[in-house]
Amino acid sequence: MAADPNKLAVFVTSPQNMAHVVGIAEATVKAGKKPMIFFTYKSIHLTKDARFKALAELCGEEDIAICADSYTCEGYDSAKDIPAGLTEK
């Protein structure tokens, strides 16, 4: 994945940056590239943001990831509480 020049990987750690994450993803698509986003640490709370489903659809499920350990540590059940726009994997 990292060697693909047509993808832009974004590593998100802060729950305060959803507008920026969405903006970067949209700009990436507009430039003809594919966004790839990884949520970890406190940013996993962004999976509950109303914009997350649209972001997941924009990126495609194969190019959006959530750190399962961070998700569990923040009180979410990674087996039962699947964020909108994603399926169990």
Image (cartoon, grey):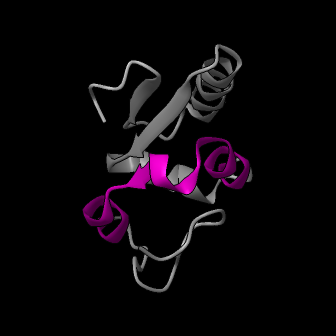
Q: Quadrant of residue 73?
A: bottom left
**What is the chief secondary structure element of the magenta stretch?**
helix
Between 15 and 54, which is closer to the camera in this rendering?
54
**Residue 13 position (above or below residue 39):** above
**Residue 88 position (above or below residue 84):** below
Residue at image position (43%, 36%) is 14
Instruction: Give x and y (percent) for residue 8.
Output: 44, 24
Count of numbered labels shown in the rendering: 0
Residue at the outermost top position: 31
Between 59 and 73, which is closer to the camera in this rendering?
59
3 in the magenta segment: no
User: Which quadrant of the rendered structure holds the C terminus?
Assistant: bottom left
Residue at image position (52%, 79%) is 81
70 in the magenta segment: yes
Instruction: Give x and y (percent) for residue 28.
Output: 60, 20
In this rendering, would 44 be left or right of 34? left
Residue at image position (27%, 25%) is 3
Residue at image position (68%, 50%) is 57
Instruction: Give x and y (percent) for residue 45.
Output: 50, 54
Q: Quadrant of residue 32?
A: top right
Instruction: Give x and y (percent) for residue 5.
Output: 39, 18
User: Which quadrant of the rendered structure holds the N terminus?
Assistant: top left
**Residue 38 position (above or below residue 72):** above
What span is in magenta? Answer: 52-73
Q: Quadrant of residue 87?
A: bottom right
In this rendering, would 13 be left or right of 56? left
**Residue 8 position (above or below residue 55):** above
